[in-house]
Amino acid sequence: MLNFDEARRRILAAGDALEPELVALTEAEGRVLAEDLYANAPLPAFDYSAMDGYAVRAADVNQRLQQGMPIAGECRAGDTPPALPAGAALRIFTGAPLPVAADAVVIQENATRRGDVVVFSEAATVGDNIRRAGEDLTQGGLALAKGTRLGPFQLGLAAAVDRASVLVARRPRVRIFATGSELRAPGSPLVAGKIPESNTIAVAALSRHAGALVERCEVQSDDLAGITFALSTAFEACDVLVTIGGVSVGDHDLVRPALEAAGATLEFWKVAIKPGKPLTFGRAGRTLILGLPGNPVSAQLTFALFGVPLLRALQGDLAASPALTRVTLDSKLQQKCGRLGFYRARLQGTRAIVTPNQASGSTFSLAHADALVMMPAELSECAAETQLDAICLRDL
């Protein structure tokens, strides 16, 4: 049985990076860069005013403080600036290019205009309220590194360096395959002994959030021949096949033998974590296979811990695995030694209030959790005020 770190290392190392494709910047949100993005020109491209005010020579202002200076004209954003005569000021607006001779901008709050004359109330310093050409990036400077996931602010920077399209990793294609004779579709007629199937909904949402294209397959009853046949076609045209249920050792846990009968090669099938010990990983040709347990929390958490990082890694994401944060237990936490525990908790600042119900079937406690507190496998008890690592669910 593998430990958590080794299992995740093997999973992340298994997949080759997906091929890149060129997409318009307007369609690139959430995608992962497959190229380094460089500035083709300085950013900003020219010196400009950071404030509304007056472009001046600082020495002229300081020599004529409290005296009037003639206004030689004005410059707005998008204009070509006029010349700035010695001893004069130029009305200027935010974003407007700076006249060649100017070395400062006096904000309008420190100026009083009287017709074509302006009087300044405070001294000026060279560089005041000016954004210099190349202040953010020199020409050829690295704007965004390959492996960066493009959020709103990264897209804004890509546009600022004049890119209309970018090379990004292709979206992983994911098929989700759930089994269980007890499952029915949410909202379908009630049947004694049947329960709504919730795992594919959650796993599909996690997959899309990680940048994947998702297809949910029809739920299969617990029949070995039927599951084997369905799996033999499910491998086709997907990068990752996620199975849910049937990977433990019960009489009706049929997915693992069905995978092998359908031609899959399985690398491992147990990980020393709680919840989620029965986790299968393997491949069929170029398709990677992640077999999740069937209990809802076990399935959803194991996919969050292993499947989401895998999908990000396939796109070359530099931050494939979520960052850990340090939290302080609000109360005592106990477990049986031997497996790394992931405990649902609510956060109040950096304090973690562990949810009372940690059952692997309690989707309610998972839906109302902020974090997964990680209790090392070798510990059986952690007192209140103990500091532990945690994964914030918003970072998945």
Image (cartoon, grey):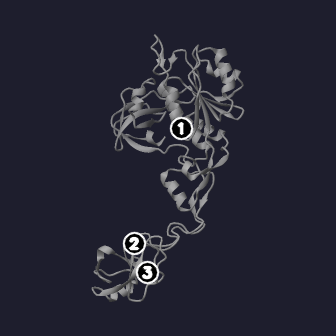
Mark 3 to mark 2 CA distance (whole Å) = 15 Å
Q: Residue furthest top?
A: 192
In the structure shown, which secondary structural element does the residue marked by tag 2 occupy?
loop
What residue is pinned by disc 1? 208
The spot of residue 391 in percent (x, y) is: 45, 40
What residue is pinned by disc 2? 93
Label 3 or label 1, whichever comes before in sequence order: 3
Disc 1 vs disc 2: Cβ atoms closer than 8 Å?
no
10 Å crowding of disc 3: few (<14), some (14-19), many (20+): many
In the structure shown, which secondary structural element does the residue marked by tag 3 occupy?
loop
Looking at the image, can residue 135 be seen?
A: yes
Mark 3 to mark 1 CA distance (whole Å) = 51 Å
10 Å crowding of disc 1: few (<14), some (14-19), many (20+): some
Q: Which corner quadrant of the image does residue 162 belong to? A: bottom right
Q: Quadrant of the N terminus?
A: top right
Q: Which mark is residue 233?
A: none
Query: Which residue is located at x 35 percent, y 33 percent?
Result: 332
Q: Which corner quadrant of the image does residue 113 belong to? A: bottom left
Depicted 67 relative to depicted 174: above or below:
below
Q: Nearer the viewer, mark 1 or mark 2?
A: 2
Mark 2 residue type = Phe
The spot of residue 66 in percent (x, y) is: 27, 85
Depicted 87 relative to depicted 209: above or below:
below
Query: Which residue is located at x 41 percent, y 44 percent?
Result: 326
Nearer to me, 389 or 310: 310
Looking at the image, can residue 149 be seen?
A: no
Q: Which mark is residue 103?
A: 3
Q: Nearer the viewer, mark 3 or mark 2?
A: 2
Query: Which residue is located at x 47 percent, y 32 percent?
Result: 341
Mark 3 residue type = Asp
